[in-house]
Amino acid sequence: MNTKWVKFICNSNAQIFSESLLKFPITQNELFGFDVHSFNEEMSHCSYFEKVTETLSYTLPSGELIKYEVVKIVSFEFKVFFACNESILLCVYEPSKSLKSFIKNLTDSLRKQIFISNATMDIIRFYNFVKSSKLFSDFCVSEITVSNLMFDENNSGELTVKSRMNALAVLEQRFRETGYTCKVMKFTFFHYGNKCQIKISKTGSIEFSGDIDDFLPKFILETLNHR
């Protein structure tokens, strides 16, 4: 499953948040709307719907330009996790290519002052948080991409390491004395005998398989708050 995580600061809670979105229900006559499936003190599970009109065109053999409009439907589910310090973590499931209009409609619907930022991940820290959990075992970093890697005092660049064992260990062994920025990591592990996989990017995109949906918010919040 592909997910996109966004962090924002807002003085709200799950009940106020959910009631605000319910004022903009999903209907055929509106350009966008929300539905709230459930909520508790820590989380709100919602859906988003939007009609997007695009103008397309083609040229006839005579040279005449024909324009027409196409209405596309954007819809997806999202969850919102509430922390105690007004930090709110938004997770969009199977997001569209751009979340710009969704974020705008969401913030307009809440009618509160909101400070939004990408959930910029310290991937190594996230990996260490997951690895330190007693719920998981048999970790394998199969792929890692890093940038700002210093090959020597005059040369730096981006590097992708793939391994059947531990790509992170290979990277640290070969470049132990230099710093780098981790952009993407793919790793696998086992949860009660079931194999799980996570691919995480620095910009907050996470693809995962396996029964780990309930654990991700905790590890992400720990990573973002542990500065």
Image (cartoon, helix red, strand yellow):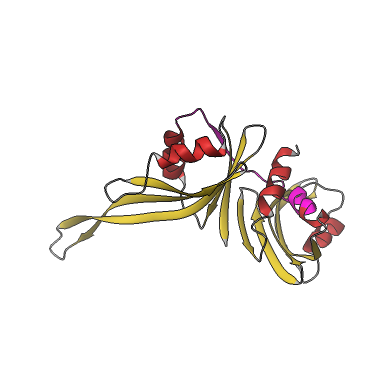
Q: Position of residue 44 (x, y in %)?
A: 55, 46
Residue 130: tell me if it is visible. Answer: yes
Closer-to-camera residue (3/37): 37
Q: Position of residue 172 (x, y in %)?
A: 84, 56
- Which residue is at a point 20% across and 61% down the rendered structure image? 59
Closer-to-camera residue (159/49): 49
Q: Name the quadrant containing residue 72.
A: bottom left
Q: Residue lying furthest left in this view? A: 62
Q: Residue lying furthest top in this view? A: 113
Q: Quadrant of the C terminus?
A: top right
Q: Is residue 125 magenta?
A: yes
Q: Is residue 39 magenta?
A: no
Q: Is residue 166 above or below residue 221?
A: below
- Which residue is at a point 55% across and 49% down the rendered structure image? 79
Q: Is residue 12 above or below residue 121?
A: above
**Span of residues in magenta:** 111-129
106 left or right, relative to 194 = left
Q: Quadrant of the N terminus?
A: bottom right
Residue 96: tell me if it is visible. Answer: no
- Which residue is at a point 41% across and 46% down the rendered structure image? 34
Q: Name the quadrant containing residue 90.
A: top right
Q: Name the quadrant containing residue 9.
A: top right
Q: Position of residue 69 (x, y in %)?
A: 24, 54
Q: Position of residue 146 (x, y in %)?
A: 71, 53
75 left or right, relative to 85 = left
Closer-to-camera residue (1/42): 42
